[in-house]
Image (spheres, rainbow, N blue to C red):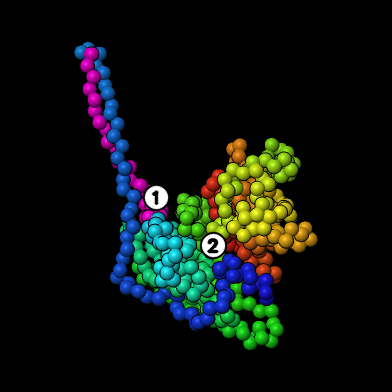
Amino acid sequence: MKKKILFMAIAAALTLSACSGKSTPPNQKGNSDAVSTASTAEATTNSAMISSTTESNNSSEAASNTSTEEPSAEARYKQAYKEIIEADREKKASLAEEASYDELAECIDCYWLYDIDKDNIPELLIRYGDCEAAYHGKLYSYIDGEAKFIDDLSMGHTGFYAVPDENGILSYWGHMGYAECWKLTLNGTVLSSEELYSEDINEKMQAGEDVWYKASNEIVPGAYYLDSYDYNNTYPMEMYETITAYANGKEKSDSENYSFPDNNPDYYTDIMQKDVMVNAVALDQFMNTLGEVPFSKLFEENQIYDYAPGGLTPLKITYADLNADGIYECIFYLNEGNNPEDQYMDYSVILSLQSDTVYAYLNFCPYETSITEDGYFITESEEYASERYVKRVLYDREKCFIYSVPSED
């Protein structure tokens, strides 16, 4: 039970903390008539001067040809959502160094993208606050060419789960032995909620039973955990169609033949031994982006993470094709105790060769129990979590993020 609690605290799925209090329905209604709009991308006009020469009189004429290209619906909703995120980011950046609790409670913390009403355009969920006691959120949808505010959401001690193939998203609250799961549905600008599950497991816990809340896919078949995204990173918006392609099974990493960069099985171990330069990039909001540094820099004190001890060494090195190009990436883990016999994973590093540069993607406190050869990070329910989680990594040089996909046992 201790490992389960630790995992969920980090993953922020069903977080347990020292705060107390009973949940409220996830959609706490504000002013339903209040609509905030984000500017849509305006059509751009390109003018080109076209010259025609008449040989008989040796004169030239200039004509202008103006073409207007309307941005696609995909580009418009992404731009609208980015503008909302950017405004919240600027608001947070403008705060004084010693901001008050109330000011911090209104600052953006992270966001989600998920198509609640299944109209092929995702909704935007933003979480505000800096701790579980302060977390609350807002829901936006892209309707009639505008990003519209739909409703306020309760987000303390809450994780969100996909509801495939039907209108809905799960809001799963868990705290101090109590749990509730609500299904939120969206019809136009109206958000509705239905309680699907509630439980008090305190008595079982006090009796020494190793219990946890009911798994989301036992409440709604096919439900799976949704990762939030760092508010400084809009790359998930750019790649939303790729995320959904993997989630819907339309795209898979199914290479049959894998090889190492330069067909050299020692390619990655040579990087480690020869202390080659790598471009170190934070894969989540906890780690640091170092830029181009010698490989050995990753293991020095306070480098990849503000509180990392020095002398870190690689352990549990494995290989997988994470970007479906048939070439292995290298994944290894770091343990703060620097004890090879202690396999606890404090950090992970992904090495990937792109063009002529080796990128090192840094991840805080990973909990996967296995990685498939075609790039799926799997956390089995038996050890760290109440249910099975499956994730992938998407990256392109300095751009990167982690996202969830459905779990298939």
| Residue 300: assigned label | none
Q: Residues within 10 Å of mark 2 (few under 14, many from 20)?
A: many
Q: How many marks?
A: 2
Q: Amino acid at mark 1?
A: Ala
Q: Please name the residue that numbered disc 2 is placed on.
A: 227
| Residue 75: assigned label | 1
| Residue 27 is one of the magenta-drawn residues | no
Percent of width and height locating residue 133 = 49, 75
Residue range corresponding to the magenta coloring:
58-83
Classify residue 58 as left or right of residue 144. Answer: left
Q: Residues within 10 Å of mark 1 (few under 14, many from 20)?
A: some
Tell me the element at label 1: helix
Kindly give the residue lying farthest to the left in the view shown: 57
Tell me the element at label 2: loop
Depth check, front residue: 48 or 190: 48
Name the residue at 58% across, 66% down. Answer: 11
Height in image: 142 above or below 129? above
Name the residue at 57% across, 53% down. Answer: 288
Classify residue 172 as left or right of residue 342. Answer: left
Name the residue at 45% across, 78% down. Answer: 25
| Image quarter of the C terminus | bottom right
Counting residues from the start of the chain, the first of labels 1 and 2 encountered is: 1
